[in-house]
Image (cartoon, coloured by chain):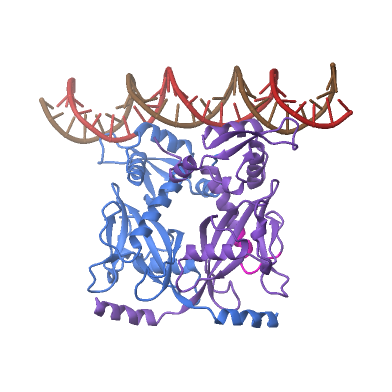
Chain colours: A purple, B blue, C brown, D red
Amino acid sequence: MTGTQHFMLDQYKQQHPYLVALDSIILGFDGDNLKVLLVKRGVNEETWSLMGGWLQPDETLDRAANRILFELTGLNDVYLEQLHAFGDPHRDPITRTVSVAYFALIKVGTDESGLSDAYQAQWFSVYELPHLLFDHAQMIELALKRLRYKAAHQPIGFELMPEKFTIPQLKKLFDAIYNTDFDRRNFSRKILSTGLLIKLDEKQKGFSKKGAYYYQVDKEKYQQASESLLSFIAN
Amino acid sequence: MTGTQHFMLDQYKQQHPYLVALDSIILGFDGDNLKVLLVKRGVNEETWSLMGGWLQPDETLDRAANRILFELTGLNDVYLEQLHAFGDPHRDPITRTVSVAYFALIKVGTDESGLSDAYQAQWFSVYELPHLLFDHAQMIELALKRLRYKAAHQPIGFELMPEKFTIPQLKKLFDAIYNTDFDRRNFSRKILSTGLLIKLDEKQKGFSKKGAYYYQVDKEKYQQASESLLSFIAN
DNA sequence: ATATTAGGTGTAAAGTTGACACATAAATTT
DNA sequence: AAATTTATGTGTCAACTTTACACCTAATAT
């Protein structure tokens, strides 16, 4: 085994190491629009960027992405999924960097307090983005594509809603994700038919005249559903 | 801009660089079983591994994955998609390496001639794998999950078939992917209803008594279909 | 009291799925 | 040459899902 290791080590030594970064596309929903959280990186910069950071020697990629997300938001139990590794040789003009992009879905509004001031973070509508650093616009584009793809095939998106929400609110989220206007009545039936929502006794007050019932996600069933497949061709 | 660059450079200099590798899960279908192509890395090694290589200074990740695939198979226009970046600090015991895994779908049998001898490559059934290097078993597991997920929701898998193929052959592929036995007649109807297949005049000879018609993929329609979404909630 | 409005339920036509019967082409046996 | 065999291909029907809308309801505003 030692002999083998030495044989391999020679090969290893000839290789070029690169910096490895992580960037997070942090998506949120404010009730009307799908938003992405951007920061100002340098102090004098005009350019906005995704929240990012460097991979540390003792970290897994997932761990690093979570740490960086926590540094900015103070949030810990967040939906966070690896999106794609970006490795164009010139994506970062300063030095060659491979960035592993993650996308996060968070609940906006509830716990904005944890947001670190250090990064001058700001929410932007995903349909009206400012000029962005490096390939970050491309990263956001891909994250939206992935979100749309996933939400079309499996229950996802509840992560963007507050703990309790109404069906009309949820419809607005899907309208925002797909930039369309679903049929209110069919949407409701379809969502409820998944059996993933628990109806609460409480009604939303003030917003509309009749008031819509609040629902919350049945987390156990939701967990199961996320793990199983839906089907294009299946029994 | 120069000032800014210097400000950032200091930050960059404090960071640790890592080696970046690429590993390919090369999947193929021999008519009966779903297979993965494995190589012997070191000369005296007992352990099988995925085909892999190092990211070179001038390459994008996609380019590097294609190059490495070509080195082994001699194939150039292959379905190749980034799967996931693996970055556990101890995944490679020799030195810290981040590996970006790709999965490839190739047509087996037709053009085996290009296979390089240098790597002692061999096809293994995905359900009967040998002991594998590092986290390569995990990579294959994820690739299968992704293939199943994708094939369930969108037309994919034709990449594993030869240029012309019969419906019963295609059914065998889906049986192998999902390790099940679909209904012959419903499968046929469902596949043909996509409108992605063009019926040829030619029949397969020798294999069965009646002989099944050959089909080929309508590449234009297939391209379009791959780009559009199917829907969980849609109009 | 009445009108207004968003929320919620019902329904009928059209389309899709799943299970299986029946018909067909070609090779093999008698 | 006729009969048998077998994989392929087409048809059908009941159950379910989807789509497009009509209509009812609860609470607020006039």
Q: Nearer the viewer, residue C11 or A112?
A: A112
Asked which quadrant contains residue A205, the reply is: top right
Count of numbered labels shown in the rendering: 0
Tell me the quadrant of the picture where the N terminus of chain B can be found: bottom right
The percent position of residue B11, horizontal first and vertical second, equals: 59, 79
- Which residue is found at the position 58% from the left and 39% from the top? A216
- Which residue is found at the position 67% from the left and 42% from the top? A172
Tell me the quadrant of the picture where the C terminus of chain B can be found: top right
Q: Which residues lie in the magenta part? A: A131-140
Q: Is residue A49 magenta?
A: no
Q: Nearer the viewer, residue A207 or B36?
A: A207
The percent position of residue A63, horizontal first and vertical second, equals: 48, 64
Up the image or down, A30 lies above or below A208; here it is below
Q: Nearer the viewer, residue B37 or A26?
A: A26
- Which residue is found at the position 65% from the left and 61% from the top? A115
- Which residue is found at the position 60% from the left and 44% from the top? A163
Asked which quadrant contains residue A231, the reply is: top left
Residue A230 makes an appearance in the image = yes
The percent position of residue D11, horizontal first and vertical second, equals: 41, 22
